[in-house]
Image (tube, helix red, strand yellow):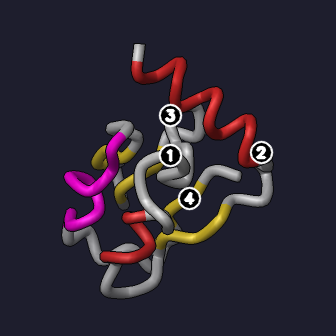
Amino acid sequence: MAYKITQDCANCGVCEPECPNKAISEGSETYVIDPARCTECVGYYDEPQCAAVCPVDACVPDPEHRETKEQLLAKKERLSN
């Protein structure tokens, strides 16, 4: 499943450069994650980098965008081309 950024976001921006898919951008109130680009870092890292670096734990799984590991790997391949 894709990740999302909650309202707890401190707008520090540390997550944005860590995303290998450029899925994170600055929103109107907080940073946001584009679920069409989020692969949970599958195929890149062992864990989602946004969650790993977030100082306030605002990057969490988004239950509205559930995907299998195979789907996430396929998305990674599409985005890489």
Q: Amino acid at mark 1?
A: Gly
Residue at the spot of label 2 = 67
Whole-percent x and y of residue 64?
79, 51
Residue at the spot of label 1 = 43
The disc, 2 or 4, on the residue closer to the chain's N-terminal end is: 4
The disc, 3 or 2, on the residue closer to the chain's N-terminal end is: 3
Q: Amino acid at mark 3?
A: Arg
Mark 1 vs mark 3, foreground winner is 1
Q: Amino acid at mark 4?
A: Lys
- The residues tagged by marks 2 and 4 sit, at their Cα atoms, a distance apart of 14 Å
Instruction: Name the side, left or right, on which 4 lies relative to 1.
Output: left
Residue at 42%, 59% (x, y): give it.
Answer: 45
- The residues tagged by marks 1 and 3 sit, at their Cα atoms, a distance apart of 13 Å
- The residues tagged by marks 3 and 2 sit, at their Cα atoms, a distance apart of 12 Å
Segment tinted magenta in the rendering: 13-20
Do residues under tags 2 and 4 come within 8 Å of each other at their CB atoms? no
